[in-house]
Amino acid sequence: MRTSPMLLAVFIVACTTSSYTTFAQLGVDNPVDKKALSQVGLSNPLIYKISDKGIYNITVKSGQSSPLSGLNFEIVFLNASFKNTNAPLPGAESNITLDNPAAIGLTVPSTVEHVIPVKSFNMVLTSSDGKELSKKINEVPRGGRILENIDLKGYIGNITINLYDIVPDPVVTDSIKKQLNTSNDTAIVDSAELQARVQKS
């Protein structure tokens, strides 16, 4: 039995239309697909905080990412005293940040930054009720910046980012001691607490 070209064309169009309809229903009605299409990030894409001892202007840069991939942000340890001088701290890096911001969902423009190299630091994220969401020990930045990925396990709301035991790289240790007028190694171990809000769009 031969099928006429007209009937065959109608059959193909019907199948194609059915496929598109099924795909649209998956994208709109399926809760798993909705979660995959949503975005999570900090409500403020740029957060600044001077560290407790005034060494660093700590900057947190947040992008948008899928909740399934976690919360992504960059921590940059800038020179807190740079605004008051025309030259960076000896040993600090002057460079262009975020060469490829799209790679991690960041939308802030590239700027010249004066970064202080950091040897290591610890970080704890807590929720608004004090519950520990994440803890990282002995984080090692590349120079004075590091990308962080945090699994919040679905948490949305206010968070505290507590950075402590921030140890400067040996290349800038003497400069920081001079800046703080101290010869004590423990006196240049810094800390900072930042407030932020995780939101989903």
Image: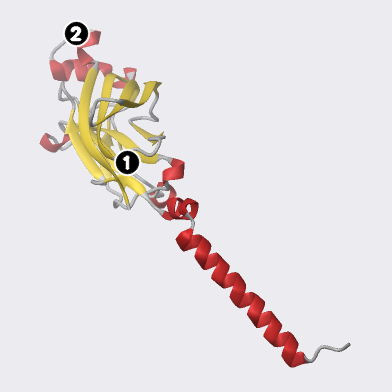
Query: Could one spot residue 88 in this view of the protein?
Result: no
Indicate the quadrant containing the N terminus: top left, top right, bottom left or bottom right.
bottom right
Label 2 or label 1, whichever comes before in sequence order:
1
Q: Nearer the viewer, residue 88 or 13?
A: 13
Q: Residue at x 51, y 67 (%)?
A: 24
Q: CA distance from mark 2 to mark 1?
A: 29 Å
Kind of residue at badge 2: Ser
* Total labels drawn: 2
Query: Could one spot residue 83 in this view of the protein?
Result: yes
Q: Residue furthest left?
A: 84
**What secondary structure is marked by label 2?**
loop
Residue 120 left/right relative to 130: right
Q: Is residue 95 above or below residue 131?
A: below
Q: Residue at x 43, y 50 (%)?
A: 35
**Mark 2 — residue?**
183
Residue 45 left/right relative to 86: right
Looking at the picture, how far across and down is residue 149, in whole percent? 41, 36
Q: Residue at x 22, y 19 (%)?
A: 190
